[in-house]
Image (spheres, rainbow, N blue to C red):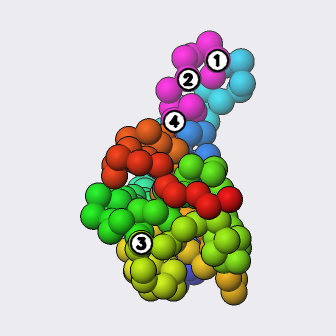
Amino acid sequence: MNLFSDWFKAIQLKPRFLFGFFILGILILLLPKDFAYFFGITDLRNQYRGWIGVGTLAAFCFWLVQLWPKFRDWLDARQEEKKVLKNLNTLTKKEYLVLAFRLHRGTQRWNETEETREIDFGEYGDSKHEIYSSLFQQGLLLEESVSIYQIPLFVWKHLQKNKSKFLSQYGNNPKITS
């Protein structure tokens, strides 16, 4: 029973430690003879080569098992970002106006009262709350706190990278009243 609890403790080590054990095992097994002799591990390596190999392989396998969920989370986040960025191609003029104005001004984060004064929603009619709500649902806008908004970082970076293409999407720069 004690042997199994020891193995479970090994499985629960942080991935960086498991990777360190894996590298250490590889070094012990694959060091040239001169280096092994210099470090005094020649006898250790010769007598316990099999056990060192099993431990090294186990450390590598446990490391992969622990990293797999993190890799899946990272991959899922990238796929979600791609879905959100596709929404930039289907924006209404009103939604485009909000994002284009912010991109034009270079402000990723803003206060709602600023925008009311600075953007001419005139011909577009709908309330800004309807527009913001639509942008929230598409993942293109975040509300940090009451009346403070932010474009998500990955969306902002994409917009900055493709600024001229995005701003020319409707042929004009956003209307600025101030």
The crowding category of the residue bearing disc 4, from other C-alpha atoms within 10 Å (few below 14, some 14 to 19, many at least 20), is: some
**Disc 4/disc 2 C-alpha distance (Å):** 8 Å
**Disc 4/disc 3 C-alpha distance (Å):** 68 Å
Q: Amino acid at mark 2?
A: Leu
Q: Which mark is residue 31?
A: 2
Q: Amino acid at mark 4?
A: Ile
Q: Secondary structure at mark 1?
A: helix
The earlier-in-sequence mark between 3 and 1 is 1
Above or below: residue 160 compared with residue 102:
above
The earlier-in-sequence mark between 4 and 2 is 4
The x, y position of residue 158, in whole percent, is 46, 48
Magenta-drawn segment: 25-36
> Pointer 4: what residue?
26
128 in magenta: no
Above or below: residue 173 compared with residue 4:
above
Instruction: Determine whether label 3 and label 2 are within 8 Å by CB.
Output: no
Q: Which mark is residue 123?
A: 3
Q: Secondary structure at mark 3?
A: helix
Q: Main secondary structure of the magenta part?
A: helix
Instruction: Determine whether label 4 and label 1 are within 8 Å by CB.
Output: no
Q: Secondary structure at mark 4?
A: helix
In the rendered view, does 40 fall on the left or right side of 43? right
